Amino acid sequence: MSNPRAFTELRWMALFLLTATGLAFAPDAYLPMLARAFMLQWCVGFICVSALLIWSRRWWMAFTALFCAALLAPQISAPEQAAFVTTDGTKLKVLHMNVLQPNSAFDAAISGALKSGADVISVQEVGPEWGEALRSGLCTTYPYVHIEPRTNCYGIALFSKRPFTRVGTIVVLGSPFIEAMIEVDGRPLRLLAVHATSPISYAHFKRRNRQLDHLARYIAQSGTATLLVGDLNTVPWDSAFERFCIRAGLAPTTGVDQRTWPSIGALALIPLDHLLISRSISTSSITTVHIPGSDHRGLLAEVNIASHAS
């Protein structure tokens, strides 16, 4: 090609298309999963590049970038969300916090938790120091407590104003999850606090997927009304998340706009933290909240347990 500029533009267009098609149609594997986790940012990036190219009158490159954004946008989907409808039943306020184990802002995080007015609080990355601080700061308001401290960022705790009829730890491939039963209007409600393995390597990616598969089978064995909250280390459009929801029989309540990690103030990039519910439970509100000193935003939700829950 005799025109160097045209040749350069053709190479950039090919790169755009290669990147977008790879993101859109890549198999369910480790590296594609990491790239696809930031699908929203890829889509916005292509739109911004297209706008800059239009401004510089590079029409074919602009059209290609816009086409790439259109190709990626449908990928940012999730399993069908639970309807935000509720008229009867008992309301339950749930707070979820991944506090970041090295974080030392104990008093500020605990103060925020108390101000939330939550009935149940799930806390993750609970090391021994966090365990002591949480017990001391929350036990008066939340007398029903189960804490599993760890030094590897996978410690976990559950606090409740309602008494546990049963509570214990489920260890799934090395990670402790908490399962608790409470009564709501005389009917059982199962609470699960979960922190799945972070897919920071291929081995961890496989472990996270196996954990979710094991947990889904465990949840599906019982027809008890179930509420699961936690850092699942997966985004709503990840295949692992969709498989988990289907196999466990749970519906997500958090959307693409409720991003929780990594957080800077009110901003975060991807939605890693989730609240999932079974049938007979609905959500009247859910929002992300600031956790002092943490790299996550928390989730604060008000759910409604239908009077016929079972």
Image (cartoon, rainbow, N blue to C red):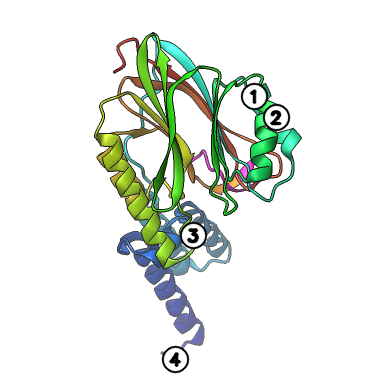
Q: Are marks 2 and 1 in contact (CB under 8 Å)?
A: yes
Q: Amino acid at mark 1?
A: Cys
Residue carrying label 3: 46
**Label 3 packing within 10 angstroms: few (<14), some (14-19), many (20+):** many
Q: How far apart are labels 3 and 4 at the CA level?
A: 28 Å
Secondary-structure class at tag 2: helix
In this rendering, the answer to whether 103 lies above or below 227 is below
Q: Which residue is mark 1?
A: 139
Determine if the magenta segment contains residue 23.
no
Evaluate whether residue 219 shows in this view. yes
Label at residue 136:
2
Secondary element under disc 4, as helix, strand or loop, is loop
**Mark 4: amino acid:** Ser
Disc 4 vs disc 1: which is toward the camera? Answer: 1
Give the magenta-colored segment's residue range: 256-267
Q: Residue at x 47, y 64 (%)?
A: 62
The image shows residue 3, relative to residue 72, as above or below, that is: below
For the N terminus, the image quarter is bottom left
Q: Is tag 3's residue or tag 1's residue first in the polypeptide sequence?
A: 3
